[in-house]
Image (cartoon, rainbow, N blue to C red):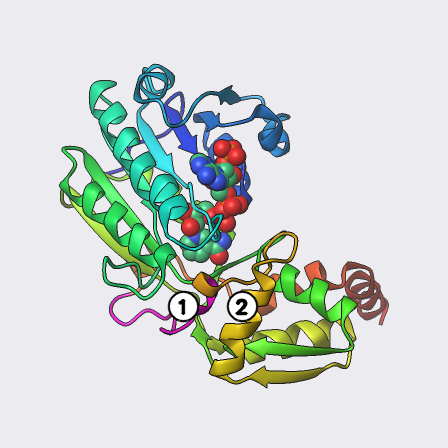
Amino acid sequence: MLNELVGKTVAVLGGSGFVGTVLANHLERSGAHTRILTRNREHARGVWSLPNTTTIELDVYSEAALTDALAGCYAAVNLVGILNERGDDGRGFARAHVELTKLLLAACVTAQVPRYLHMSALNAAVDAPSHYLQTKGHAEALVAAAPLQTTVLRPSILFGAGDGLFRRFAQLLRLLPCLPLAGAGFRLQPVFVGDIADLILQLLRQLLPAQHERLELGGPAVWTLRQIVDYTARHLGRRRAVIPVPAMLARIQAEVCEHLPGKPFSRDNWRSLQTDSIVTGENGFARVGIIPTPIEAVMPPLLRPREHYTALREKARR
Ligand SMILES: NC(=O)c1ccc[n+]([C@@H]2O[C@H](COP(=O)([O-])OP(=O)(O)OC[C@H]3O[C@@H](n4cnc5c(N)ncnc54)[C@H](OP(=O)(O)O)[C@@H]3O)[C@@H](O)[C@H]2O)c1
């Protein structure tokens, strides 16, 4: 049964980020009102121009502030996630992933928000090898036990404009004469960020078949990290040697990179790369009839926009 979103209010935590900005645009088109709950209004600049989107700055670690901000909402979407923390003891991950989820779920119950969607990740589990995946696993357990209609989304790595996958490799390939690559054989099933936003909208429109559901989400093809880098280099027009880094050296590389500005790679990132990020059971996109978008349909113009459109113009003239 369809449950239209027109006029309904959806709160999005972590809505200023990569997924959140795309989601806010999709929600805008659906006729919903969106409330972006953020630690800092400036972070949500990307959605300021959307007329039906309001940005609320608050202490996201205050249950009372969250409860106030959720008043009258039909649904809450939790997109908060960090890939790195200060140090390496898991406390930063636990705060952002577990503590925040606990507070938000409690606030949803008090504010009587009936529907909750939670972004997790493939391989999240309480006994996973990295703090990132462990804390995502603990958060999933909290969501499953909450007295609300809940959905957990477990995607592989996401791609799209401004992603952390192609964009990061493109920056490195522009900068370096050759690329030492840790986890070159790591397999992933990249998911288009626009498909995730479509999926969230579809799920918000549906009545759930059960009180709680968990969807594993993968794109249409399995790639290795090495193939992603080669593809990026080819589309950037850069010929670069890619040097796979053996496991022993990768750990050292991670320790060194942890101390660089912006922490481009960390020990915890390396631990997350120990298990392939691919869907093993049913792909959740099938449940709502979404056909996952391939990388080839999205990335070429994003990697090299000028050349791509010149080629299209030339082709059109022929
Ligand atoms: N990108 C991927 O490839 C990928 C793959 C699998 C799963 N995911 C999951 O999908 C979700 C969205 O990912 P994304 O790529 O959109 O992330 P993102 O761009 O980094 O955005 C995450 C948002 O979380 C909030 N946030 C960051 N640190 C926080 C902290 N310490 N405490 C509270 N809030 C904090 C920020 O919102 P404010 O600054 O506005 O408060 C930020 O906009 C995350 O849960 C992520 O783990 C992402």
Exactly how many numbered labels are in the figure? 2
In the rendered image, residue 259, in percent from the top left (x then y), is placed at 60, 58
Which class describes the residues within 10 Å of circle 2: few (<14), some (14-19), or many (20+)? many
Instruction: Quadrant for the N terminus, please.
Output: top left
The numbered dot on residue 71 is: none
Q: Is residue 273 magenta?
A: yes
Query: Which one is nearer the viewer's eye here, 22 or 118?
Result: 118
Which element is circle 2 on?
Answer: helix
Secondary structure of residue under mark 1: helix
The residues tagged by marks 1 and 2 sit, at their Cα atoms, a distance apart of 10 Å
The quarter in which the C terminus is drawn is: bottom right
Going 43% across and 26% down the picture, which residue do you hit?
A: 32
**Residue 100 x %, y %:** 33, 35
* Residue 222 quadrant: bottom left
Nearest the viewer among 15 and 196 is 15
Q: Which residues are magenta?
A: 269-282
Q: Along the horizontal axis of the image, is 80 left or right of 265? A: left
| Residue 140 position in % (x across, y down) | 24, 48
Q: Whole-percent x and y of residue 150?
A: 22, 40
Q: In the rendered view, tell whether residue 54 sits above or below residue 236.
A: above
Instruction: Tell me which amino acid carries mark 2.
Output: Ala
Is the C-beta separation of discs 1 and 2 under 8 Å? Answer: no
Which residue is tagged 2?
A: 254
The amino acid marked with disc number 1 is Arg
Q: Residue at x 41, y 27 (%)?
A: 60
Taking the magenta stretch, the answer to whether it contains residue 38 is: no
Residue for point 36% across, 46% down:
91
Q: Nearer the viewer, residue 252 or 11?
A: 252
Local crowd size for mark 1, using a 10 Å CA cut-off: few (<14), some (14–19), many (≥20): some
The residue labelled by disc 1 is: 271
